[in-house]
Image: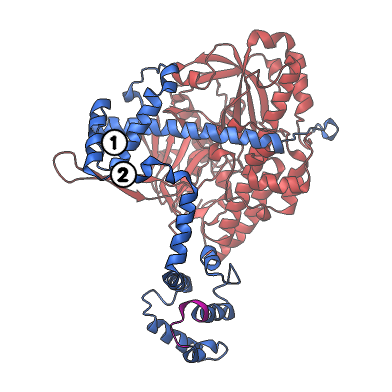
Amino acid sequence: MTTIRSYSDELKFLERIDSHCWRIKKGFVPNMKVEGRFYVNGHLEKLMFDELKQACTYQNKGGFLPGVKQIGNVAALPGIVGCSIGLPDIHSGYGFAIGNMAAFDMDDPQAVVSPGGVGFDINCGVRLLRTNLQMKDVIPVKEQLAQAMFDHIPVGVGSKGIIPMGARDLEEALEMGMDWSLREGYAWAEDKEHCEEYGRMLQADPSKVSARAKKRGLPQLGTLGAGNHYAEIQVVDEIYDMHAAKKMGIDRLGQVCLMIHCGSRGLGHQTATDALVQMEKAMKRDKIEVNDRQLACARIHSKEGQDYLKSMAAAANYAWVNRSSMTFLCRQAFAKQFNTTPDDLDMHVIYDVSHNIAKVEEHISFIEYQLDVKYSSMVVLKRIANLELNNVMNILSGIVWRSAKSSTCWMENRRGYSFTEKDPLVPFLLITHSFLSTTRVYFL
Amino acid sequence: MFRRKFRALGYHKTDINLQDEQQWRNLIVWLEDQKIRMYKIEDRKRLRDTSTGNWSKAFSQYLDDLECTVDRSNRKTLCDWLLGVAVRTDYGENVEKYNTSQKVTSSNSDAVDDPFAQLDVNSADFKAGLLSICHLLKIPEHYDPITTLQAVSLLVKDRLSEEAQSAVMEEGEDFDLSNYEVGFETRDEVINNASCILRLLHIQELRDLQTKINEAIVCVQRITANPKTDQRLGKVGR
């Protein structure tokens, strides 16, 4: 940050596109390769600009870089395509803002991959399970049920899981992801279909994960950890799209669901830390310049870049195995409490959305040539870009799912944003909430 | 790489390192000695002498003599081409052997009793018959008679067979195509709708496939699955 401008000068670089979208023009921070965009409603907009105003007043001394600046810094990374996007949960994070999403062209030799874009809790995500229980079935036994969940899923910093794992099991789990859970019988065959990447990243290479990371991850499988992670019992409160809700089997008010928010625990954190150390060296070697030291990165095709993508994929697999193990344990806890089987409770996975992940994607753009007046538009397919995604929003049958309930909850604490507030920008399919604060099982 | 070609030719290895000079030269000599036999035995001396500096020249001459047209600087391409030549030579010399073995396998199946094996799909009679069936069943004709026949077979199996007749037809729900995003735009409503329908049919096919895959996974799980928990391992953190 060399230039220090006044708040009103900063505002000249921000331009409203429509009621919910803002453009960040080039020059807002140095070296911007593309423009930035962010999507907010009136409420979030105010928070966003207040953050910037504060930073201008105190001239970035102490505290976080404001989210808008971080979007700009990401737009200055080599190889970025399209624009640097801030999704509605945008707020200041490590290097990348939380809710910041960017794509990099793998065919561009200068393009980089940055662990800051993925985050420290690799493949942190939320998973929703349905049940055929109603609120009235659960209320009388809520304390016992909460206890059964606590017994099955240890929580807190330094917790250890109840699923026996050997070093070899861990290696296999890192390589196979949810296929390991399936083989060992911790998951149902259908579970995979509802996960991104079918619960397994094929480029995972356990040998690229450090021994230290494995040592941290080994006893932690099937545990929630701390921070904003939770496994909570929720109730369907309101349904916005009956057709979609029916397809997912969550179509009754008062229906009990389970949501698990967790990631790759110590293993992912260590993997990211290891990669950052390697990348600082690679940046010096390849003379990559970034605006913020937290945006340490390496060229995608360099050894460091490739090693990171492989180890990140292994950590992502661990996170899926972890969520699958907790799914198994939740099913056990419910089955025990209601003296029946998870099958009879219809405890299917509805979705599993990863919000801290980098993926290789192929995108196709359509260019049409009008050759004749009638019936002759030809479609030319052209491969343009591969993507790195952070805070993935899943688009399911045209409905934008707000994936990061976690960050919303977090925001609830940090920024006074209420989760159940009806926000026209966030078209929730359904809004679920914990029905009583005592049954919010783990919110640590 | 080239595993199947090596195996087919009966080379003693099924995987060689093309960048290893000795392995590469030995392969070339073996191919010429055993399979290609371009030169007379006494003329192979220069090529066989793999340890001298003249080998590259001899090899280049050899490729000229074989009328090699592929990129000679790329060993992978070259190896593939040479193996191809060897396979062709081998086949050319034993056409009968290879062709009869194929007949044996096909006669093993029940093709002999199959009246359709003798069917000539391109005969005028067949085509006329097919056309009249198409008219009866109201199926549009495809330029390939076999495809048309497949469509007829599908329709008969799914709708007209005894099984399909006795099964209760599942009443689908009406679905408004305009509610479905196909993901691209062709500027022609008919084509848009058609691509929509094809996409939906494709999804249904994928669904059926996934269901079968899931059934297979469940079968395998009966053998492999053994989920364990041990409460003693658990430890609640801070």
Residue B113 is left or right of residue A214, and the answer is left
- Give coordinates of residue A33: x percent, y percent: 41, 52
Residue at x 38% of width, y 31% of height:
B201
- Give coordinates of residue B15: x percent, y percent: 58, 68
Q: Amino acid at mark 1?
A: Glu
Write down the residue under mark 1: B185
Front-lying residue, A92 or A400: A400
Front-lying residue, A110 or A48: A110
Q: Chain of mark 2?
A: A
Label 1: state its secondary structure: loop
Q: Amino acid at mark 2?
A: Phe
- In the current view of this chain or complex, which residue is farthest to the right? B232
Q: Which chain is blue?
A: B
Q: Chain of mark 1?
A: B
Confirm or deny contact between disc 1 and disc 2 (CB under 8 A): yes
| Colour used to depict chain A in the structure image | red
| Magenta-tinted stretch | B33-40
Residue B237 is left or right of residue A397, and the answer is right
Identify the image quadrant of residue B128.
top left
Colour basis: by chain
- In the current view of this chain or complex, which residue is farthest to the left? A373
Residue at x 34% of width, y 50% of height:
A382
Q: Distance of mark 1 from mark 2, alpha carbons?
A: 9 Å
Front-lying residue, A107 or B220: B220
Label 2: state its secondary structure: strand
Q: Quadrant of the C terminus of chain A?
A: top right
Q: Residues within 10 Å of mark 2 (few under 14, many from 20)?
A: some
Write down the residue under mark 2: A366
Front-lying residue, A355 or A370: A370
